[in-house]
Each structure stands twice: as structure tokens, then as C-alpha cells.
Image (spheres, grey):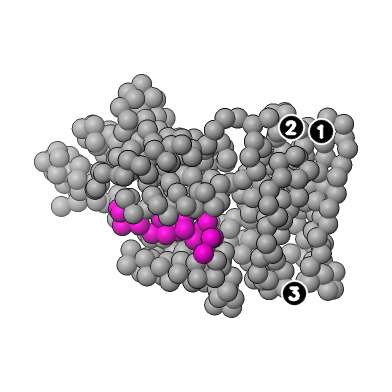
Amino acid sequence: MNRHLCGVLILSLVACAPTAPESLSVVLLPPAGLAGEAQTELASEGLSALLLARLRALPDVKVRVDPRGCDWPGGATHALRISRDLTELSAITGADLQHCGNGRTEQEQWVQPRHEQRDWSALAAWWVGARLGVPRPRPPPGPTVAETDMQPFLVALARIKRRTADDVAEARMTLQAIVRHSPEFALAQAHLATAELLAFEYGLQSLPEALEQADSAIEQALQMDPDLGMAHAARGLYWMNQDRYDLAVAPLARAAALDPGEPVIALWLGNALLYHGNPNEARPWLEQASTLDPGLVSAQISLGEADCLAGREAACNRFLDDPGRGPMATFVAALLRAQRGEIAQAHDLLDRVPVDVNHGWVQELRGDLCGLDGNSSERCLERQ
């Protein structure tokens, strides 16, 4: 692995790294599903993810999802409720922003043709920002999307976020169908690229297949929208899957600048820096990912890994003793134990790796461990 990263780029990334806590806090109430909508829960999850990424890009604003709204025990200055309705001809979206201190509510509504919808999340975040006193440039209108594509797209977003092999497989098939029907849907192309690459990570297809499919989707997305953050992020993930972390940093840094509210982009940028041998430069981005989405388990795992690679022994030991949940937690702990020469402990951890983790990675690490202990353990004898 190449360990030399351009010093100027590292310094600029550190300078741009996220700063201090915010004074404004918005609680987003989970959007209600539409009557008759298929897979309502997943569609609402996907809509929340899309809207959260836009809201979290507002400077100096903390955003959480909680059905309690202003009654959220963490304290909130505002609560945002999104309502949706369909008529025979129109898709109607309403936003109610409640001021928790005095109960005053401000409202807005967007109406669009039912059968030619747009992603209105950026416009909604712009409106909220203006109400909060953190105005942003008004976003241009996005491309229209068929009603039959928008709802499955939201479901696919939710499945990708769940990060299980079955959900990634379902999301990939859904997104493939959407872009066949609507190849101009740039955001769907970008998320399809990430789904193709995740499908390799979960052992659902070979790396050459994943790279070919992802490359095509990324190119199409960027051709339609050169400033689409998720497309640049997918390009970074494309290079990371080939262990070219040196090439991954630049597109991920651009993606983070274009889409600063998307926690998975901050996570991937942090991981690219981490695996390129820069754990201290990686840490602010991993912390940003965890702050944006406290439920993002992968960010907590990477922070533990950063502690180990930076030589913070006490923090590293705490992580190894309790690597947390998530499919990759046990595998990463096994890898780090192996790097410390703790072969027996690494073997034990590999025995507990969930089936969602790429089987090839597990077997490769097992082979390395067996080579280190001279193939003398019972597990190694079983492999022969």
C-alpha cells in the first residue's frame, strides 16, 4: 500500500475539517407514509435519509430524527414535520417548522405534478435554513423523476443504509431497474454505483464485475451532473476497493465539499486517509461522520481502528475489548489483533465474524494467520 500523501492536500483537508458544536438544533419527525404506498416504512426511512443529508449541510445546526419533536430529551430549538399527500394530478409536500421555545409554527408547501416529481429535499433544507437565520443559495430545480421511480428509489436508499447483504442485494436490483427505465436519474446512478461496490464487499459479486458496473454508473451520473457529490464519493469508493487510497482522497474530498451533510461521505474520506497511513488526519472526518449520524456504526469502528493505527494504546485496547456491533466490527478487531501478533485471539474473533462479511476476506486473513502460526492450530489443520 502506498503510504505517501501530498502534504498540501492533507493540510487543506485538516483546515476544512468540521469544527465546533452548534447552537441550533432541529428534530425531524419521521415522515409519515402515504396511504396505499408500498413498503411505507422503508420509503419513509429513505426520505428521512435524503432530507437529513440536506439539513445537516446547514452550518451551525444539529439535526436529529425523533418522533417526540420538541419533547426530545436532548433539547431542541426547532421541530420539523414533513407531510405528503397525493391527489389525482399532484404530489403535495408540506413542511411545518415549530419553534420549541414559543410554539410558533411556520409553514410551507410544494406542489408538483404527480407523475413527474422532483427531489425537493434540497429546496426544503434551503427553506428551513432561511427560517433559522442560516440562509444558503437557493438550489436549482432538479430533474423530474417518474412517480414509479421515486418511491422505489427511496426504498433503495433505506436498504443501502441498513448495510446487510440481503438489503444491499435488494437495493442493487431496484436501482438497476430504475436506471434502465430512467437513465437520466443521476442520483440513482450514483447510488447504484455504491450499491455495486458494496455488493462486492458483501461477497455478492466479483471485484471486476463490481468495478465495471460502478464505473459505468459513475460516468453516467457525472455526465448529467458534474457537481453531484455522491457520484464523486462513489468514484472514491471505486478506488478504495482497489486499495488505491492515494487516488480515492481527491474525489472524496470534493464530494465532502459538495455534500457536507452526508455522513457516509465523511466516513469514506476518513477511511481513505486512515488506510493511506494518516490516522490523525482521518480522525476529524470520522468524528464528523459520527456526529452527523450517531447511529453510523461503521464510523465508530473506524475511530477505534484509527486509535490503534495512531498508537493510542489505551483507546485501542478499549476498542479491541469491545469493538461494538455491526458486521465489520469483529473482522476489524481480528485484523488488528493479527497485526499485534495476537494470533489465537484473532482466530477466535474470525470464528465469530457474521456471514454478511465478505467470505474471501475472512479466508484470506485466516490463511495469513495460519502462515504465522505454522499451520499448527486446529483451525488451520481443518483448512488443509
Q: Which residues are magenta?
A: 226-244
Where in the figure is residue 106, as x and y percent of width and height?
86, 45
Where in the figure is residue 5, as x and y percent of width and height?
30, 44
Q: Main secondary structure of the magenta part?
A: helix
Where in the figure is residue 343, as x and y percent of width and height?
22, 35
Q: Which residue, given by chain and number where applicable, does mark 3 sit on? A: 115
The residues tagged by marks 2 and 1 sit, at their Cα atoms, a distance apart of 7 Å
| 75, above or below 209, in the image | above
* Outermost residue toward the front in this view: 8
Secondary structure of the residue carrying tag 1 is loop
Q: Residues within 10 Å of mark 3 (few under 14, many from 20)?
A: some
Residue 300: numbered disc: none
Pointers 2 and 3 in contact (C-beta within 8 Å): no
* Outermost residue toward the top in this view: 314
Q: Nearer the viewer, residue 267 or 195?
A: 267
Give the residue at x 51% y 68%: 221
Q: Which residue, given by chain and number where applicable, does mark 1 sit on? A: 100
Residue 199 placement: quadrant: bottom left
Position of residue 62 in the picture relative to residue 20 (left or right): right
Residue 371 placement: quadrant: top left
- Mark 3 vs 1, N-terminal side: 1
- Mark 2 vs 1, N-terminal side: 2
* Outermost residue toward the bottom in this view: 181
- Mark 2 vs 3, N-terminal side: 2
Q: Which residue, given by chain and number where applicable, does mark 2 sit on? A: 76
